[in-house]
Image (cartoon, rainbow, N blue to C red):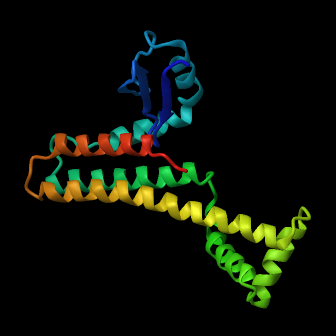
Amino acid sequence: MSGYSISIDPYGVVLVRQTLNGDNHRYTLTPEQDIAGQPEEIRAFCAAHWTPQTRQVYAAYQERIPSSSATTQEVMDRAILTLKDLHASFLQAHAGQPTLQEYATWKLKEDAARAYLDGMPSDAQKTMIEREAAGDDTPPMALAQVILRKAEAFHHLIGIAGGIKRKADAAIARLGPDADNGAALNDILAKARVAFDQATVS
């Protein structure tokens, strides 16, 4: 085992967690840094993920970081926006990167699956389940069970993500509107990134 856990956040920041003798050491790398001294597997990860598009996203993110002349409210608004982006990225990544169109069907499919398993589907729900099941000859009841298991897993995922975001939102709110809070906000966002990175989805 290498002892490294490597991931990347929505802005192109690489999150590295190294485990040595049971202790975790964490640090971040950005596309503007010199990573020549990093281990080979980390350099390879960065090379694969720091595409021109990712570098553009990072650059745009840097432009959103408040300047020294930004008002306190502007600083807090941008921090809240960043937190929303982290929350959305976590859900997208762990839900299999669904499109908006796919996501729009999930609640309908969940309701249809529950009704089908309860033996009380509407005609439309019955047609939905049976036509999808016919696509690969899966028994409709089996498909309904799979849909329901996935729905329950997504509920669990929403709870994890919501809890992390709610904790960070509360920490931001406690700073108050008049606080000199740039460093404190950065610390809150950094902790939220680590929390999303470490979250266990079962």
Q: Is residue 21 above or below residue 94?
A: above
Given residues 2 and 125, the one toward you in this image is 2
- Where is residue 27, by image quadrant? top left
- Position of 30 with respect to 3 (left or right) is left
Q: Residue at x 63, y 51 (%)?
A: 96
State which quarter of the image contains the N terminus.
Answer: top right
- Position of 18 with respect to 121 (left or right) is left
Q: Residue at x 18, y 48 (%)?
A: 70
Q: Residue at x 43, y 9 (%)?
A: 37
Q: Position of residue 77 (x, y in %)?
A: 26, 56
Q: Is residue 67 above or below residue 132?
A: above
User: Among all residues in the image, which is located at the extreme top?
Assistant: 37
Given residues 173 and 57, the one toward you in this image is 173
- Position of 25 with respect to 184 (left or right) is right
Q: Residue at x 31, y 40 (%)?
A: 190
Tally the numbered discs: 0
Q: Position of residue 47 (x, y in %)?
A: 56, 22
Q: Position of residue 189 (x, y in %)?
A: 30, 45
- Where is residue 107, by image quadrant? bottom right
- Where is residue 199, by image quadrant? top left
